[in-house]
Amino acid sequence: MRIVFLGTSHGAPEVGRKCSCIMVETGKNRYLIDIGIDPIPDLKNRNIPVESVKKVFVTHMHGDHISGILPYIGGCSCWWFRFSNPEFYLPMDIEKFKIGMNAWFDMLGSKIKDFAFHRVNDGVICDDGTIKLTAYRTKHCEESYAYLLEAEGKRVFFSGDLCPDGPDKDFPTEVLNAPLDLAVCESAHFDATEYIPLFENKKDNIKQLVITHYTEQRVPFIHEMAATLKGVPVAIARDGMEFYI
């Protein structure tokens, strides 16, 4: 399995860092976790077939996690990518989303394909024979989720955005009861050191930890966390970074 960070920034782009978008590759299929950017340029630059993206999972509907969805839908509807047919999983009322989406493309005079949209709820939301994805409700906003992705016998956790009061109020600790091959956690809304009490007694179940969606001012706290959680490899995500598990 390959994890590629297409965008690692927080609520706004930073120099060299776009908004949130992570690609998961397993076999010949690709999946996206959040779509804060239009991923098509990155896919093309990497010689990845656009039609290989099978599903897009959005953690919550804030702009830095969702703003790429309309240009992506428009792109997948055009002749050049006519074989692309991703499904979308959104934590909001699907009919309400479609009304806004259709109004946008009507304004542009564009026609789009009839893509499949699914509403995210707690529990297993996808099991397509390649991946299994479980959603955990969080308190970041009215409807927000963390995701556990299982594929190839591996477990990868994506925190999404958590409650600004800290991970001790919001992190779904049950995911730590079995080994995680990779944990991808945010640090835009609190210092990474606030993860230490949660991870200290479970660090044997975390094979690798990546901090993404952070502000540059919080980077020293990521280093402090890494120094404290001895035995757990900690990486600071940058756009283009890849992990093989």
Image (tube, rainbow, N blue to C red):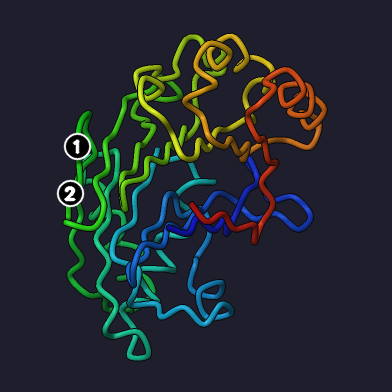
Q: Residue 222 at x, y = what percent?
A: 73, 28
Question: In screen coordinates, is 217 left or right of 149?
Answer: right
Question: In screen coordinates, is 96 left or right of 64?
Answer: left
The residue to which callout 1 is attached is 124
Residue flagged by tag 1: what amino acid is it?
Val
Residue flagged by tag 2: what amino acid is it?
Asp
Q: Residue furthest bottom?
A: 79
The residue to which callout 2 is attached is 127
Q: CA distance from mark 2 to mark 1?
A: 7 Å
Answer whether labels 2 and 1 touch (C-beta < 8 Å). Answer: yes
122 or 19, nearer to the observer = 122
8 or 208, nearer to the observer = 208
Total numbered circles: 2
For the point 31% across and 44% down, which residue is it? 150
Q: Quadrant of the N terminus?
A: bottom left
Q: Residue 180 at x, y = what percent?
A: 43, 34
Q: Quadrant of residue 50?
A: bottom left
For the point 36% across and 31% down, which residue is it? 145
For the point 40% across and 17% down, which residue is it? 173
Q: Quadrant of residue 171?
A: top left
Label 1 secondary element: strand
Q: Residue 184 at x, y = what percent?
A: 53, 38
For the point 29% across and 77% down, which residue is it? 84
